[in-house]
Image: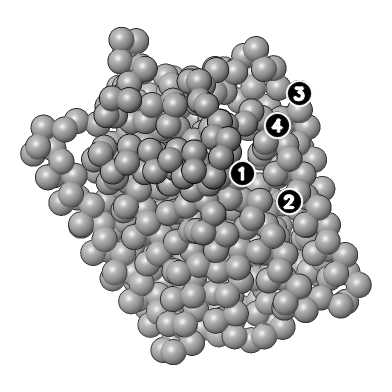
Amino acid sequence: MSVGFSLRNGGRALGHRNYRLFFGGQGVSLVGTWMQTVAQAWLVLKLTSDPFMLGLLSAAQFLPVLVLGLFGGIVADALPKRYTLIATQTSQMLLAFILFALTQAGVVQVWHILVLALLLGLTNTVDMPTRQAFAVEMVGRDDVQNAVALNSALFNGARIVGPAVAGIAIGVFGIPIAFLLNALSFLAVIVAYAVMDDDDLRSPAHYHRPATVRAMGASLADGLRYCWRSPMLMLPIAMIGLASTLGMNFGVVIPALADVVLKTDATGYGFLMAATGVGSMVAALLIAFSGRPRPMIIGIGSVGLGLGLVAAGEIHAFALALPAMALVGLGAISMAATANTTIQLNVEDAYRGRVMSVYTTVFAGSTPIGGLFAGWLASATTVSASLVIAGVLTVATGFVAIAWLGRIRARGIAPVLAVEPAAASNPGGPPR
């Protein structure tokens, strides 16, 4: 793994055929996902005119991850990841078709949307940790940082395209078209998984599938102890949880910011979300082309995220809100992608699914709490005030992360930032 910013670092993961298939399929599917995210939030706001309902929608989608996400890691470790992902993606496609049918028929109600969001969350309890853990099987340890960064770039490239296209499509054709296009987009990633070559996948460490409830509990407890004993796993997991709860639920408030404060329409809302994607993509590409992760960016990214939220809350002009949202995206993905990579390089393969389930549970599972908090705060005060308060708290979280990393380094504990052949089997974690 080369050190420092270099063009040679940018596309290493794409040298693996299975990852190229994954990258192409995800590229199509994620655009559809972002189209649905924008359309769904706009539909709920128009049906209720209450920002709190957007928080409730967010909670419905991510509450299952919070409650059951750790068990999803056991599934990720115990079952073949590729076939598991085909099953979860197929389920999500069917849910999108149902939402399209209800909306197109003109019978959709808020409770329909909440129930479908809850079912989507149930599939994500398995899909999220499995997809995160599958990255290293496609590219190996040496290229996992590049794969994580490219995934982030892809995700946020879709965040640019999806909301912008959704805003225009909703304005021209109405809300249902976004749900239909999202459902169809799942076909791309399902086909990509189906045609992958199993022989090119890196076999994970042998893991005994728990056969009883007691054995499942023991396996889960073993994974949690493993995280607790490793400072370079606990730092990114804990800090991403705090920052996600406090500052990364801006999606709950931005529809109301667009409608109430900036006095714009669905197209304007789409471009606000696209601006966030621009900043996010810049951050992801910078990480992709760098030679190694720098854990300090977890704290620095949190500070940037918080400052962007404060600026978005204080600025009431649409043209100036766009760069503020770009800063939000830049900080959020700098922090999240660095946290993900730090974990991937400091976890043993035998624990990868369970550790990534802890990460995804904390990351996505913080959304029900943070989403409800953001929605309540916007309803209890003002949309602008809620963004400022969230921003200040997120800046403080960033400084906590920086201080925590300083203490870890003072104890002489160094993160695994590059993979040496002799150390590849046990990168910085406690012995099994």
User: Tag on residue 92?
Assistant: 2
The CA distance from mark 4 to mark 2 is 15 Å
The three-letter code of the residue at mark 4 reads Tyr
The CA distance from mark 4 to mark 3 is 11 Å
Circle 2: element type? helix
Report the residue at 54% width, 34% height from top. 210
Residue receiving disc 3: 195
Q: Quadrant of residue 101?
A: bottom right
Residue receiving disc 4: 83
In the rendered image, residue 128, in percent from the top left (x then y), is placed at 56, 45
- Answer with mark 2 or mark 1, whichever residue precedes in sequence: 2
Q: Nearer the viewer, mark 3 or mark 1?
A: 1
The three-letter code of the residue at mark 3 reads Val
The quadrant of the picture occupied by the N terminus is top left
Q: Is residue 122 something one can see in this rendering?
A: yes
Q: Is residue 385 left or right of residue 191?
A: left
Circle 3: element type? loop
The CA distance from mark 3 to mark 1 is 19 Å
- Asked if the residues shown at circle 4 and circle 3 are in contact, with their CB atoms under 8 angstroms apart, the answer is no
Q: Is residue 225 left or right of residue 123?
A: left
Residue receiving disc 1: 127
The CA distance from mark 2 to mark 3 is 20 Å
Report the residue at 45% width, 32% height from top. 352
- Asked if the residues shown at circle 4 and circle 1 are in contact, with their CB atoms under 8 angstroms apart, the answer is no
Q: Quadrant of residue 113?
A: bottom right
Q: Quadrant of residue 327?
A: bottom left
- Asked if the residues shown at circle 2 and circle 1 are in contact, with their CB atoms under 8 angstroms apart, the answer is yes
Count of numbered marks: 4
Q: Nearer the viewer, mark 4 or mark 2?
A: 4
The three-letter code of the residue at mark 1 reads Asp
